């Protein structure tokens, strides 16, 4: 069965959010099979990005929490969990 040009275009249409989610999933799949040394380098790189983001956006956190009061508790729990994990690293 031959599909029309319109049907093919709808199949190939993808949003930016969907693309980012697909890339993230592929990176997680790839990360589970990485060499331990490579995982260490990737983790250091990602923590560097996290540190830069924290330094850049720290002053806006209170305003964001007031605006996004429903999301803030979950974010606080995530940050707390991440802090505990980072404190265990030696």
Image (cartoon, grey):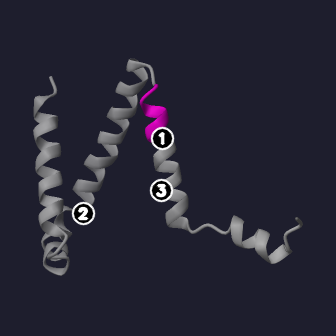
**Would you name the residue on which mark 2 appears?**
57
Residue 19 image-quadrant placement: bottom right
Q: Is mark 2 on a helix, strand or loop?
A: helix
Residue at the location (18% across, 80% down)? 67
Crowd tier of the residue under label 2, counting other residues whose Cα lies within 10 Å: few below 14, some 14–19, many 20 or above: few
Q: For this rendering, which residue is in front, 32 or 58? A: 32
* Magenta residues, start to end: 28-33
Which of the marked residues, 1 or 3, is nearer the chain's N terminus? 3
Query: Looking at the picture, how far across and down is residue 54, in whole percent?
Result: 23, 55
Give the x, y percent position of residue 87: 10, 34
**Element type where label 3 sits in the image:** helix
CB atoms of marks 1 and 2 within 8 Å: no
Which residue lies most toward the front here? 1
The disc, 1 or 2, on the residue closer to the chain's N-terminal end is 1
Q: Which disc number belongs to residue 27?
A: 1
**Outermost residue, right side:** 2
Pick the residue in front: 59 or 14.
14
Residue placed at 39% from the left, 19% from the top?
A: 37
């Amino acid at each position: 069965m031959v599909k029309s040009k319109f049907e093919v275009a709808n199949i190939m249409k993808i949003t930016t959010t969907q693309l980012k989610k697909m890339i993230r999933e592929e990176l997680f799949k790839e990360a589970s099979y990485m060499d331990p040394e490579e995982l260490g380098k990737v983790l250091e790189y990602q923590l560097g990005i996290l540190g830069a983001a924290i330094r850049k956006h720290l002053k806006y956190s209170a305003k964001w929490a007031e605006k996004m009061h429903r999301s803030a508790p979950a974010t606080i729990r995530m940050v707390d969990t991440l802090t505990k994990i980072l404190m265990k690293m030696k």
